[in-house]
Each structure stands twice: as C-alpha cells, then as structure tokens.
Amino acid sequence: MQSFSVVIVGAGPGGLACARLLAEHGLDVLVLERNSAAGPKVCGGGITWDGLIKRVPEHLIDGAFTSQHIRSNYQQTVIQSSDPIVATVRRDVLGKWMCQQAENAGAVIKTSCVVNRIDSDSVATSQGNFRYRYLIGADGTSSIVRKYLRLATEKVGVGIHFLVPGNFEKMEWHLNNRLFNNGYGWIFPYQDMASVGIYGVKPYNNPKKMLANLRQWAKQQKISLDGLKPKAGLINFDYKGWRFGNKMLIGDAAGLASGLTGEGMYSALVSGEAAARVILDPEYDCHELQQLIKKQQKHQRIVEFSAKNKLLNITLMETLILALRTGLIPFSMLEMAD
C-alpha cells in the first residue's frame, strides 16, 4: 500500500490550494478526484475581487465589475467602486490552472478516482488503497470524509443556472420575494456568455418550483433559455467544525459556504490554505479563517431570520437595499471576503 503524508479527497479550489502549499513545503501529497478533470462545478463563478486577486492571476478573470446592479420588489440601486467589486472566473479554467500549479509543486493528482471507503489511516479507492498521516475532505456538499466523521448536513442551499450565450454588460442581483423567496436571482457575465441563475435555501425553497420561477424570471428579463439545459448543485453551509485530529474538512465539505449568497470559492481557498498551514505548523494562527467563520455564521442567522415569514423577509430585503443605497452598510457585508 502506497503511503502519503497527506491525502486530499476532492480537487476543487480548496483541495488544490491546500495541495500546492503542502507540496511546496516538501510534503508528499495525493489528491483524489472522482471526476475526469479538476474544477468543473455548477457555479455562478462570481467571487469578490479582493478575495480572488490575492490567489488567482488576473489573466484567468473573464470579467471584472465596478458596478453591482441590485433590484428588489420595490426599489433598485447601483453600487459603484473605483476598483472592481466582483469578478467572474470559469471554474474549468480555474481548475485546470490550479491543478497545474499543484502538480508543478510536486503533488500527485489522480482523476476518475472514486473513494469507496475511509479507514482510520487509509482510504480505499477505485485505483488502489493509500495510507495517510493526514486526511483532508475537500469533496463538497456530499463529502465522504464528512460522512465518515458522522457530521449531518441539514442546512443546504440550492443553485440552479443556465449558461446563456451572448454579450451581457451588467452584473445583476435580483431580490424578488415572489419568485425567489429569501434567495435571489443573478446574471453574472463572462466574455461571451452569462450565468443566469437562482439561489435558495432548503427547505424554504423547492428545487422544481425554483426552476420554474427561474424560467419565468428569465423571460421577464428578455433572456431566452430555449434549447439550453439547466444545471443544479447543492451548497453546504451547515458548519460544525473543520479540525478533527488528523482529519480536516475544508470548503463546502466543512459547510463553510455562505448560506446568504451561496458563495463558496473564497471560503474554500482560505480554509484549504489554513489546513495546509496547520499541518506545516500546528501552532499556526488561523485568523483569516476564524474571521470568515464569524461572517459565515452571521449570514446563517440572516437566512434563518428572513425565512421565518414573508413579511419579515420583504422587510429585511427592502431595508438591506435601502441601507446599500444610502451607504449605511457596504456591499462587503454580503461578501465572504473582508
């Protein structure tokens, strides 16, 4: 049985960031990815500029937006900044680049490799068994590592989107209570297309109804979805900890995504790097991750509060946009990055 210092299950942004950092410091690292390639995922691809620019080169960015167009049932506003507020990046492009970076650093990455069983010091996969000193779950909402740790996943968001060809100029957020409940609809432009989607939290939103409302809303926005197939994914924001002895969870596997916005790339990157640094130095101060966890939990409270009844939800949405319009709160309050 082949042995590695660290085995990482999942080759998303968090797992690959963790693998690269560990390999750069001389540790032998194995990344196991069940899909045929690293990166692809149902995702709007929007990430805060501050969070992205620290870790990803600008040439991977499809679009960078200094304006955010936000609409609700009764009002709308445009948040502007001299620097980009949110950027878009294609997950397949990001995954390919991060995979190359990790491999260049010395990490071993096995794709089309399904983890069948986890034991206390080894994993059994479709490509053999591997022993580890540290095991990291970076395998998303349906994480097998999380299941091994017997952590339930109850607080889950649902994202559904279409990739629509065309030129879209504005990044838009729509808070429409009638169509999206306490979620939102989005239009995130890329160079030659846009992710047009909807986000909501279970059980307050039914995926089948969400898809119907997404189609209705897109028609209202004069966006044709004819001939396009929707893609859907689950987003875990049920955080119950990330360090469990020599086993760690990062990103969606840890439930670190924002329940309010569904954004998870930044938290995956931060937690992946934190896990690597803790392995390298057990006394490492995970300050950035702790700040992210505090904001994630604040977002969770807002979601639960707004879901209690329709009137509370509408009041919260309208108050939020009014506060954004008047500058009482910054757009960064909604972001996972500080």
Image (cartoon, rainbow, N blue to C red):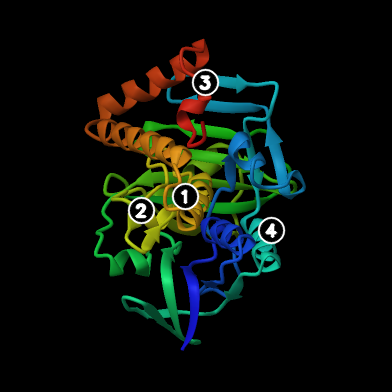
Q: Position of residue 332 (x, y in %)?
A: 51, 27
Left or right, 29 with respect to 317, comes to: right
State if disc 1 and disc 2 touch (CB < 8 Å).
yes
Precedes in sequence: disc 1 or disc 4: 4
Question: Mark 4 vs mark 3: which is more N-terminal?
Answer: 3
Looking at the image, is 290 positioned above or below residue 39?
A: above
- Dot 4: within a 10 Å radius of its alpha carbon, few (fewer than 14), some, or many (20 or more) residues? some
Residue at the disc numbered 4: 93
Q: Which residue is mark 2?
A: 242
Q: Which residue is mark 3?
A: 76
Label 1: which secondary element: helix
For badge 4, the amino acid type reads Val
Instruction: Name the mark on residue 271.
Output: 1
Q: Are marks 1 and 4 in contact (CB under 8 Å)?
A: no
User: Does dot 3 land on a helix, a strand or a loop?
Assistant: strand
Foreground disc of the pair 3, 2 = 2
In the rendered image, the residue lying farthest to the left is 308
Q: At label 2, which amino acid type do we have?
A: Trp
Report how far apart the C-alphas of labels 1 and 3 lie in the structure: 34 Å
Q: Amino acid at mark 3?
A: Gln
Amino acid tagged 1: Ser
In the picture, the disc for residue 204 is none
Q: From mark 2 to mark 1, how far is it between C-alphas?
A: 9 Å
**Disc 4 and disc 3: Cα gap in Å?**
33 Å
Q: CA–CA distance between discs 3 and 2?
A: 38 Å
Q: Nearer the viewer, mark 1 or mark 4?
A: 1
Gap in angstroms between the C-alphas marked 1 and 4: 21 Å
Q: Earlier in the sequence, mark 2 or mark 1?
A: 2
Query: Looking at the image, is mark 4 or mark 2 earlier in the sequence?
Result: 4
Crowding at mark 1 (Cα within 10 Å: few <14, some 14-19, many 20+): many
Does residue 141 appear in the picture of this structure?
no
